Amino acid sequence: MLRIYFDNNATTPLLPEVFEAMRPYFIESFGNASSIHRQGQRARAAVEQAREHVAELIGSRPAEVVFTSGGTEGDNLAIFGVVSPGQHIITTAIEHHAVLNACKKLEAEGVELTIITVDGQGRVNPDDVKSALRPNTQLISVMMANNETGVLQPVREIGRIAAEADVFFHTDAVQAAAKVPIDVNEINCDLLTIAGHKMHAPQGTGALYVRRGTLLKPLLYGGRHERSRRAGTENLAGIVGLGKAAELAQKWFAENGPAQMAALRDRLERGVLAQIERVRVNSGSAPRTPNTSNILFDCIEGEAFVIAMDLKGISVSTGAACSSGAIEPSHVLVAMGLNPDEARGSIRFSLGKQNTAEEVDTVLELLPEVLSKLRELSPAWKKHVAVS
């Protein structure tokens, strides 16, 4: 069966060029980047070259890039690294749990926490962030792009607010990196997180931008790796892959990649809206990453939809999370004002650089049959049909 993968916000496949760049560092060039012999020197050179590529992707100095194991570690290092009990954090209701749960952990340890709400399109109002500032505010953490809807947040405006208040600003750019251009100086952030596996690099790699002069308490204690900001022997092959993916992203931007990807996303949305009734695009009028579409199909259960599509060879996802065996509605969609049934009926389609127009058309061809069968089993749909 032909598989079509439209769940790239969960993880992306390695690009062939990334895999080829990594291959030598598994076998031939396997040195420890902290060793001073030739193998170690080659490893160090590869790490530093990757650091330069990541820095170019986000507009920073190479020395400001700290390699991590991914987005969760980067978010945790940013938050725990600058905040202490008695201080105040501002974040939003739509953050990834790597941010939300880190903030709630600090709240349990004596940190004051303010969680800002969003509008119906999933956007934060910068004025709400400004109004939440206190004399003891230490950190503002607002994501750049939402993982469920793709909505881009007004991070430049929030960065200016943070700078004027002399408050640290962190942005989780895991879903934005390599999809939209990033310049840390334009954003005016002090800390920024990326993850390799969201941008066609390997799982288990990532980076945290730390603005020069920002004092960061480490999460890990050991050697003096990453300028004493992240102890542990570097993941050599993974870092090389991250660097190559960053290099390829720069080329993709130059070749008008975002516009081409947005055209595929729009092709999908137009096709769905044209042939399916009682459907809408969540956050459809908000600025979004070019690859993400979150679509509400009324009168279906999202989990059943994902399973039915999987049986057709198509991988998509819901905005719901499984917790202790119970399906909970997406905290992001609920924060936007959707009721639990609407949130559970919302499906995320997220494209990657490997996807094609032919794959979009195949999904559009199979979608009506899948929805028809699911809605036949839905009491809400039967009621709708009877009324209409």
Image: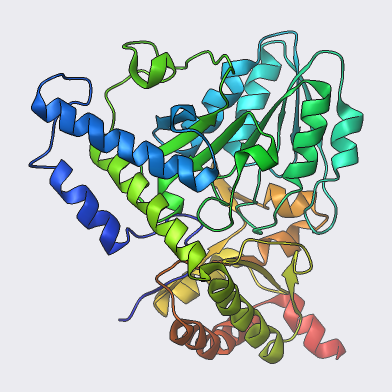
Q: Residue furthest top?
A: 86
Q: Is residue 205 visible?
A: no
Specify the quadrant of the image occupied by residue 190: top right
Q: Is residue 332 left or right of residue 225?
A: right
Residue at 59%, 81% in the rendered image: 268
The quarter of the image holding the C terminus is bottom right
Q: What colour scheme does the image use?
A: rainbow
Name above or below for residue 332 compared with residue 218: below
Q: Name the foreground residue: 375 vs 357.
A: 357
Residue at 48%, 55% in the rendered image: 10
Residue 183 lies, in percent from the top left, at 60, 44
Residue at 52%, 24% in the rendered image: 77
Q: Name the foreground residue: 117 vs 381.
A: 117
Name above or below for residue 252 compared with residue 271: above
Name above or below for residue 219 compared with residue 188: above
Q: How many marks?
A: 0
Q: Is residue 283 left or right of residue 242?
A: right
Q: Name the foreground residue: 85 vs 143.
A: 143
Q: Is residue 248 visible?
A: yes
